[in-house]
Image (spheres, helix red, strand yellow):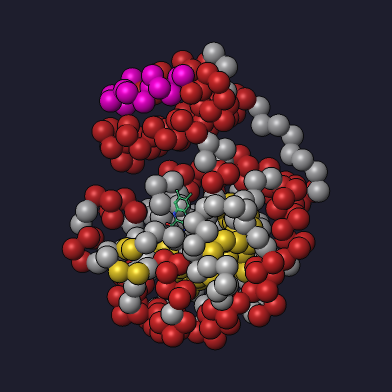
Amino acid sequence: MSIQIGDYVLKSQVLLAPMAGTSDKPFRTLCREQGAALTTSEMVIIQKHLLNTSKSKHRLDFSGEPAPISIQIAGSEADELAESARQALTYIIDINMGCPAKKVCNKAAGSALMQDEDLVKDILTSVVNAVDIPVTLKMRTGWNVSNKNAPIIAKIAQDAGIQMLSVHGRTREDKYKGEAEYETIKQVIDQVNIPVIANGDITSGKKAQQVLQYTGANGVMIGRATQGNPWIIHQINHYLKTGKKAPNIPLNDKKQTILKHIKQIHQFYGENLGTQLARKHIFWYATHLDKKNGQTFWKKVNKIKDHAHQYQLLEEFLQQL
Ligand SMILES: Cc1cc2nc3c(=O)[nH]c(=O)nc-3n(C[C@H](O)[C@H](O)[C@H](O)COP(=O)(O)O)c2cc1C
């Protein structure tokens, strides 16, 4: 079942989730290489006074990335989000109603917007009308267990011209607690004809297949399971295509991928910021490859401030695996 968003036909059913602090340009590039059909940027708040900050510049840099590119915008008001969409013009605009952060710029945003269905309708209509590129929506199942209104919002979204939905199987109040449920995602799918992507706690090819079969979703979106393990995208794709587990990825290939990724972080952000931002990836990689010694290694490498020294210690750690 291929996923179509506007003119774009996605090459697989596996998408990378937008993750602030993780799905930056180096990580998106890596996940596309691993077979992600679509990657979405970290959320950006496109307001004039924020545009010149180093954070926004990095978040709005899509140069050299293969199409389609999806940029996620966040905000609280219809006009403001429509203006963000106009300025962000890329290939696909994704609207954030999935993030549990209490406030963005001191106002209700992200999944908090789901509480006000009229406002949702206003926002979605304004953004869709503001641009002539596809607009998609990322949301949760509702704002708490008694108010799982994702199916209602899905219908509003389709009527407003939204071209794809991704749904995380938790409510806003759940934050990341408990387990994701897929029943509400199934109900969303019953309401609409546009593609729906299931998200939440999908950590293997088998789980991805079960979720697809149970919900009837068009694809899956993977978030935390990719941290330190971007190869999971390839593995899930392989399982969905063949029904079999993918052969293990040779350790040497993983090592090369990790070093290339860390080098790209240093280059993209510059030596100082790059060294800081590489730390969490190094932690995830080290503990993914070696649970016990990875922790000890990370305690040592976490203190390093020089990018070349950080890279060298990582290289040495990988060599002895
Ligand atoms: C560190 C982190 C940052 C996130 N940032 C965003 C974001 O900016 N926008 C958004 O819509 N969702 C965000 N999410 C939610 C993810 O996109 C995803 O819905 C959630 O992690 C559940 O999927 P998973 O179980 O595969 O991780 C974030 C999640 C994490 C862990």
Q: Picture coordinates of residue 14 (x, y %)?
A: 63, 55
Left or right of 189, for residue 278: left
Q: Which residue, as the protein is rendered here, is positioned at the far left?
A: 49
* Most foreground residue, 178 or 135: 178
Q: Start and end of the magenta stretch? A: 296-309
Q: Picture coordinates of residue 67 (x, y %)?
A: 50, 59
Left or right of 36, for residue 301: left
Quarter of the rendering occupied by the C terminus: top right
Residue 292 sits in quarter: top right
Quarter of the rendering occupied by the N terminus: bottom right
Please tell me which residue is depicted at 72% across the width and 60% down the height of the picture.
212
Left or right of 211, for residue 196: left
> Can the viewer see residue 19 in this picture?
yes
Please tell me which residue is depicted at 20% across the width and 57% down the height of the picture.
52
Q: Which residue, as the protein is rendered here, is positioned at the far front?
A: 146
Q: Picture coordinates of residue 189 (x, y %)?
A: 67, 73
Residue 159 sits in quarter: bottom right
Q: How many marks?
A: 0
> Can the viewer see residue 94 in this picture?
no
Q: Can residue 300 be found in the magenta stretch?
A: yes
Please tell me which residue is depicted at 42% across the width and 73% down the height of the picture.
113
Q: Which residue, as the protein is rendered here, is positioned at the far top?
A: 320
Vertical side of 105 occupied by 118: above or below? below
Left or right of 225, for residue 28: left
Provide the major secondary structure of the magenta segment: helix
* Most foreground residue, 24 or 142: 142
Q: Can residue 26 be found in the magenta stretch?
A: no
Vertical side of 292 occupied by 166: above or below? below
Please tell me which residue is depicted at 46% across the width and 30% down the height of the picture.
283
Vertical side of 301 occupied by 234: above or below? below
* Most foreground residue, 178 or 313: 178
Q: Picture coordinates of residue 285 (x, y %)?
A: 51, 31
